[in-house]
Amino acid sequence: MEHLNYQFSRDHEWVKEEDGLTWIGISDFAQNALGDVVFINMPEVGDEVTAGDPFGDVESVKAVSDLVSPVTGTVAEINEELLDSPELLNSAPYETWIIKVENVTETEELLSAAAYEEFCETEA
Amino acid sequence: MKLIFEKSRKGHSVSVLPPLDVETVSLPAGMDRESALRLPELSETEISRHYKELVDQVYGVNNGFYPLGSCTMKYNPRIDEEAAALPGFTGIHPLAPAEATAGCRKVLEEAGKLLGEISGMDAMTFQPAAGAHGEFTGVMLIKQYHASRGDVNRTKIIVPDSAHGTNPATAAMCGFDVVNIASAPNGCVDLEALKNALGDDTAGLMLTNPNTVGLFDPNILEITRLVHEAGGLCYYDGANLNAIMGRVRPGDMGFDCVHMNLHKTFATPHGGGGPGAGAVGCKAFLKGFLPGSALMGDNAPIQVRSFAGNFLVVLRALAYILMLGREGIPEACETALLNANYLQMKMREIFTPAFDRLCMHEFVLDLSDYKKETGVSALDVAKGLIDFGIHPPTMYFPLIVHEALMLEPTETEDRETLDRVAEIFAAVKQQGIDDPESLHTAPHKAPIGRPDEVGAARNPIVRAEL
């Protein structure tokens, strides 16, 4: 798997560390369960996010679902491309980050790619 | 097909107006319209054909099976329509003199009494226009109650995660913070999660019972006791009243107020946008907070709609209740449960039930495994069913089941229909195994094929250019 350096939350977000920031996106399992994503609500740069709390939501043709933050910290960047092209979450979930977080003070217990795959088996 | 405005041709008209035989009255200055009304111009023939064309594109309960879970699409008896069409009821205005509206007031009074008996409530309002509006009114009762006692720190409403989306929306509309609690593995309220959520900031609990997965909560008395013990009130969402009517009463379960969707449970037409009626009942101690109409001279603390609400819907509901009577109401409920359980038993040989146990009036299938094997989603199966001439069940609800199809056959279907429906589901399942692509693009025989749902959500056209 090309996303071996990713870690995963039980809420189906992926997390990776790059450029000193924590990148957050949604997993392939999540995008598949959501179906076609049509809108995304994201926080603003500078907003605080809290581990275990929603930081935004995604609307698919099925439903609106919360995006749950795996970390506590401050939003450093948001992926503005998603405002116009939310379908990137479907077509390339692992290349599409949603937010990048700095000053991370707390991180949920995360799963390795292999453990997450196992977790998804039991979820589905 | 074209919109009626697109069919409009200048000068086409229906000349049926008799000559004016009363004096012309001018409006006060400044009240005249500045430009002409833009109305379509068509002949009677064209109008008739336009609406027939619309009718031909519509699928209703009188076309066939319509198992839209959570919506209670039962057949509406004609006699209720006839009652509602009586000229004494249709030709009346709410501000007509009291002696002219005595019959209408009697209808509201009788309907209130009977619905109060069915729900176990002491007082009733018919102002709310439909279900969500009824929820709003009910939660406003809770808000006023706490305010009247100076108990102003109760800012939270507890809503289980299996609730209709309208519940948290209602609580937020009324200015409360929403506390979501997760369901227990059995699909019902998690008592520990409820206890942890309760406190001196709890204004109330909103609950649907049986809940949205069609399960009656066995702990309901304990749930309402805990909420009351914490000082909160209990609101009953009547969305699933069809599953208990005549057998169990929300008032006896410990609820303080309730809304009932007359347009669902009491067989008045719905599904085309209304009108509905969200009658709200409450226990005696909340009666003083019920809404009323200032225009009709009611002395009420709040008003949620003009006049007395959607009166003709209430009238249809009254006719329906009187027609079924004391024996018929529980029999309808029992038949709805029997039909749902019968169909669930047939279906479990085809798809996997989300909760494999006796259900109430509806049940949920989980197509996750089927999707993994075939790539065919619950959406594809739903679309495929259309080609067999039945209406699809509710899809992707409740959210706690991933590939959900939710079926509510109601009491107005017979066994032969349910058998045939099970055969159709089996046929669609097989089609997904043999030729999944044909389901990805279904339906193929309906007036409208597969609409572009993504395009519709991303680039909605919400205003017609006329």
Image (cartoon, coloured by chain):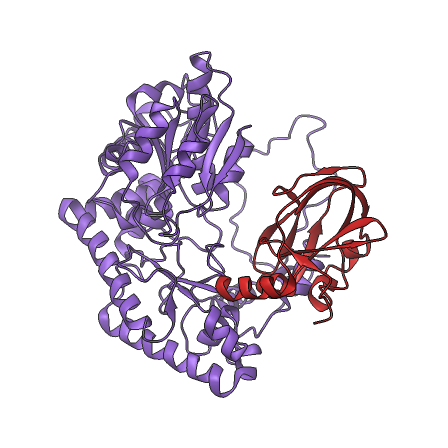
Chain colours: A red, B purple
Residue B149 visible within the image: yes
Snapshot quadrant of residue A101: top right
- Left or right of B80 in this view: B20: right
Q: Position of residue A103 (x, y in %)?
A: 79, 39
In percent of the image, x 65 and y 61: which residue is there?
A: A27
* Residue B6 seen from this side: no
* Residue B60 place in picture, x, y as percent: 41, 64
Q: Count all numbered tags in the image, as a single digit.
A: 0
Q: In which quarter of the image is residue B278?
A: top left
- Locate the N terminus of chain B by quadrant: bottom right
Q: Measuring 26% from the left and 33% from the top, which residue is drawn there?
A: B251
Furthest residue in direction top, as rendered = B150
Residue B376 position within the rendered picture, expressed as x and y whole percent measured from the top left:
52, 76
Relative depth, front residue between B408 and A124: A124
| B353 versus B298 height, above or below | below
Please give left or right for residue A75 compared with residue B382 in the image. Answer: right
Q: Residue furthest bottom?
A: B434
User: With A32 as the anchor, is B157 left or right in this view?
Assistant: left
Residue in the foreground of this view, choosing between B464 and B389: B389
Residue B120 vs B77, above or below: the answer is above
The quadrant of the image that shows the C terminus of chain B is bottom right
Q: Which residue lies furthest to the right in this view?
A: A19
**Considering depth in this image, is B229 or B303 the residue closer to the camera?**
B229
Residue B70 x/y as whole percent:
39, 54
Q: Which of B435 and B413 is in front in this view?
A: B435
